[in-house]
Image (cartoon, coloured by chain):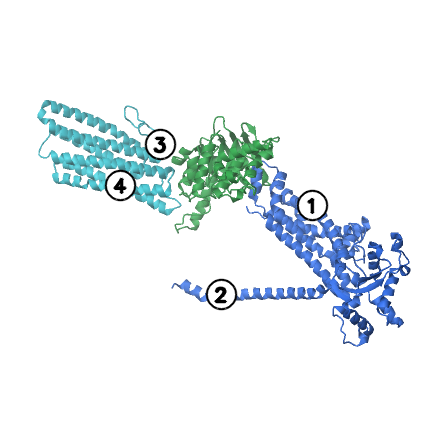
Amino acid sequence: MNTVTLANDSMTFPSSGTTTTSSVNKTDVDIHSVVEELKRAKQAVGKPFLDNPKFKTRDVNVYYNQTKQAIFNASLDIGRNEVIAMIGPSGCGKSTYLRCLNRMNDTIPGTKVTGDLLLDGEDIYAKDQDPVLLRARVGMVFQKPNPFPKSIYDNVAYGPRLHGLAVNRSELDDIVEQSLTKAGLFNEVKDRLNSPGTGLSGGQQQRLCIARAIAVSPEVILMDEPTSALDPIATATIEELIDELRSSFTICIVTHSMQQAARISQRTAYFHLGYVVEVNDTNTVFTNPGHRLTENYITGRFG
Amino acid sequence: MSNATAIVKAGLTKRYARERRFRLFGLVSIVISLSFLAALLITIFAQGLPALRQTYIQLPVNLDPALLAVNASDSPELLQKAKYAKAIEAALIERFPGVTDRKQKMALIRGLLSKSADNELKSQVLANPKLIGSQQNFWFLANDDIDTYIKGNIDRSLPEADRRIKDFQLAWLDDLEAKGQIEKRFNTVFFTSGDSREPEQAGVLGALMGSFYTMFVTLALSFPLAVAAAIYLEEFAPKNNPLVDFIEVNINNLAAVPSIVFGLLGLAVFIQFFGVPRSTPLVGGLVLSLQTLPIIIIAARAALKAVPPSIRQAAYGMGASRMQTVFHHTLPLAMPGILTGTILGMAHALGETAPLLMVGMVAFIMSVPEGITDPATILPVQIYLWSDSPERAFVEKTSAAIIVLLFFLILMNLLAVLLRKKFERRW
Amino acid sequence: MDIGHHTSQQYNHELEDVRNMALQMGGLVEEQLNKAMRALMESDSQLAEEVVNSDYKVNRLEVQIDEVCAKIIARRQPAASDLRLLISIIKSVTDLERMGDEAEKIARYALTSQGTSSPASLHSSLRHLGNEVRDMLRDALDTMARMDAEKAKVVGQSDERIDAEFDYLSRELLTHMMEDPRNIKQSLNTLWCARALERIGDHSRNICEYVIYLVEGKDVRHTAPKNGTIPAI
C-alpha cells in the first residue's frame, strides 16, 4: 500500500482486461461528477477550523496562468505547534498550497493567489507584507536536500547573516551550534564545520537544510516531501527530528508517504484535484476517514 | 529458444557489424583531422623555429676619436651625434682590405651588417664612453640576406646571377666563418622590438603589446556588459515577453554576424561618428567587444541556466531577495562556466583580423605601443603583413609570429580548462 | 462497505480470503453449537463426543486467521476500512474461538449428564434459551457476512433477551435445587450449560459490535447504559 497512490486515478482504469469504451466514458463521467461534488461541498469534511490558529486560510484560489487553476477555495487552519500533513495524489495542489504559505509561488511568473491567508491574523499577501520578512518567519525545507555548495558553517550561518541576526562572530557561532544541535547534526559534523555541506550523506544534508531553516528562528517550517529522496534510516531520523521540533515550531509537511503522515502528524489534510477534501485528526483520518475519496486514497483504492 | 530470441539473435551480427563500422568511421575521421593539424604544426614549426636564432658577425672596431669626431669626456648629447657609421665603415674596410671595386665596397658597407649596426655601436659606447680611443671587438646583427644564407636557405650551387648572395660575398662569409667571427645566437630582437622594414630588426613585441591592449579593452568592456546582460535576461527579464524574446533572438543572431561587418560598423560609428583615434587598441577593442559580447552572453546564460533551480529555491526559502540570490549563489556557481566562455570568446577575438583591418590597425608601426591610445597593430595583422612582404627572411618571421599567436591561444584555452577544473563544484 | 477495488488485485484477494476464513470459522462454530445443543437435548453421547473432538478445528482456524492477518498488516500496512476489517476479524475470531470452547463445554455436560433427567419445564426452558442463542449467533454471523451495521445494532440488542432468559432459568434452577438437594448436581450441570449459552450470546453481541466498528468506524463497546442496550447510533 505504501507505494500505491491514486496518482493516476483520473487517467488509468482497473487492469482487469475488460476495459471497454463504455467504461472509459463511465470513468470520464465519474471524474466529472467527482469535481461537481467537490465544487458543491462548501468546506472540507472533518475539522478544518481551529480556535486561535497559527495560519488561517480561507477561500484560497491559486492560478498558474489565466487558464489553469491549481487550488480551488481551500479553507483550513493550521494550529500552533502542530505537525500538519498534506497528502493527496500528484498534482492535487498540496505542494502549491504549501508554497502559498511563504509566498514561494511569487517566484513563479504568472502565479496568482486570491483569498485570505493570515499568519497570526496578519494577511501575508497584503501589499505592505514583505516576502523576504515572511520567509524569515516561515522557513522551508525542500524535497531534494539542497545545501549551498559552501561549508557546513556557512550554510547554517547564511540566514542569520542575511537578516543580520548576529552582531559578531561568537554570536553567529552560537546560532550555528544551536541550530545544528536542534537538527541533531552537531555531534556528527562538529569536527568538520568548514568542510563542504555537499559532502554529507543525503540524510545529513537534509538535516543541514533543516538546521539552516531553523537558524533564523522561524515560527513555521514548511517541508515539501523532505524525505522522499532518503533511505528509511535517514527518513526515521528526520521524522524523529520533526517530532522534536514540534515543541518550538509549527510544521507543515507535504508527503507522498501516507505512513509518514500517519506517523508524524497530529492533523492531516487530504487534497484532491485542487480541493481540500478532508482535514481532521490524523488518527481519525487513518482509521475512519470521513470522505470516500480520502478512504480510497489512503487504502490504495481506485475511483 | 523462443521465437523472439531467435529473431534477435539473427539480427545481432548485423547490429555489431554496424557498430564496428561506425566506430571505424569515427576513428578514421579523427586520424584525418589530427594529421591535418600535425601537418600544419610541423610546417609552421619547421619554418618558424629558425627565426629564434639570428646571425651575428664579429667586427673589430677602432673607436678612434678622430673618426667619431668626439672624445670620451664629451657630454652624452655630443656622444649621441658621433659618427658611428663611419667607424663601422672603416672597420669593415679594414677587415676586408682586398675590396676595391666600388660595387663590392657598397655591398660590404650596406649588405654585410644590418642597418642598425651603427645604433648598436652607439648604445654600446653610450653605456661605456671609456671605450672611445680603443680597439674593441663587437658582435653586430648580420643583414637579412646573410642570415638567410647562414640558415641554409640560399643554395650555393645556383648560378651566381640567380642568388642574392654573390660569390665575393660568399668569400667574405667563408673567411669570417673560418675565423669564427660569424655565429648564430638567440634572437632577442624578435621579442623585444616592433615591426621593421628590415627583417633582421623586425620583432613581434609591438604586435604583442597591441594585442594585449586590444584584448584588455575588449575584456574590460565586454565582460561586465555581457555578464550583466546575461544575468538580466536569465534571472530578471519577464518570461514569454515578446520584447525579451526579440532581444534574445537578436543576441543569438549577433553571434553569427560576419566579423568584417563589425569592422565596418566600428569604422562608421566609433571612428567617424565618435572620433575615436584610428589604428589604436581602443578602437580595436571596441570593435572586438561588439563581436565578443554575444559570445559571452550566450555562454553566461548557459552557465546560469545550468545552476540547479534547487539552489535558487533554497536561497528564496531562506528569505534572500532576487539580487542576493543571484550574487550569493547563482553567479558564483555559474562563474566557471562564464569564465570559460569569456576566455574562449577572448581567444576568438585574439585571432580576429578582418574587422581590425577596417579600423586601421593594419598600419605599419615601428614603435611598441605604450597605451590604449597609441597606434598599434596586433598579432594576426602582423602575420598578415609579414606574409605579404617580399623579403625571404620574413617567411620565417611569419611562422614564428604564428607560433607566438598559437602559444597564447593555447595558453588561454589552458587557462579556461584550469579555471573550470578549479572552480567546478558539484551539487 | 467495500473490500475490493484496491489498485493491488493481490490485496483484494488477501482481504477476501481472510474474510472468508473468518466466515468459515463462524459457520463451524455455529455447527458445533447446534450439534452440542442437540446432543444435550437428545442425550446423544456420540454427537457430544463428535463436538468435543471437533473443537480443535475451530482452534486451528483461529491460529491460521491470526497468522494471515499478521501477514497482511506487516506487508500492506492497512489503513481506514481495511485496517478496521482486519481488527474486527482478529477480534471476532477470538470471540468465535471462545464460543467454540463454550459449545465444547456444553457437549461435555451432555456427556456427564447422561442418564439423568431433568424436569420437562427446565428442559424446555434450556431448549428455548439454546434456540435464542443459536438464532442470535446466526444473525450475528449474517451481519458479519453482509457487513450490515443496521442489522448488527438490532441483533446486538437480542443479547438483553438472552440475559433475561438466563436470569429466569437460573431462578427456576435455584427453586428446583431448594426443593430437593438431590437435584443440586443435576441442576448445576444445567446451570453451567445455560451459563455457556449466555456467554455465547455475549460473544455474539461482541461480534455485532465489531461489525458496527468495521462499517461505521465507531467503537460502541462498553458504551451501553446500565440496561445493556446498544445505543442507537
Tag of residue C63: 4
Q: Is residue B371 above or below residue C211?
A: below
Is the residue under label 1 in contact with that under label 4 (CB below 8 Å)?
no
Q: Is residue A139 above or below residue B144?
A: above
Q: Give the letter of the chain under mark 1.
A: B
Report the front residue among C77 and C107: C77
From the image, tell me which residue sits under label 3.
C218
Q: Chain of mark 2?
A: B
Q: Chain of mark 3?
A: C
Instruction: Answer whether labels 2 and 4 touch (C-beta < 8 Å).
Output: no
Quadrant containing the N terminus of chain B in the rendered view: bottom left
In the rendered structure, find residue B224 and report the number of the disc placed on it.
1
In this rendering, do the residues under marks 2 and 3 share a single chain?
Answer: no
Residue that badge 2 annotates: B16
Q: Are marks 1 and 2 in contact (CB under 8 Å)?
A: no
- The label nearer to you, 2 versus 3, is 2
In the rendered structure, the colour chosen for chain C is: cyan
**Residue closer to the observer: A268 or A235:** A235
Chain A in the picture: what colour?
green
Q: Nearer the viewer, mark 4 or mark 1?
A: 1
| Same-subunit check for callouts 1 and 2 | yes
Query: For mark 4, does the 10 Å Cα neighbourhood hold few (<14), some (14 to 19), or many (20 or more) residues?
Result: some
**Residue sitting at the far front:** B134
The amino acid type of the residue labelled 3 equals Lys
- Cα–Cα gap, marks 1 and 2: 52 Å
| Chain painted blue | B
* Residue visible at 34% across and 46% down in the picture: C13
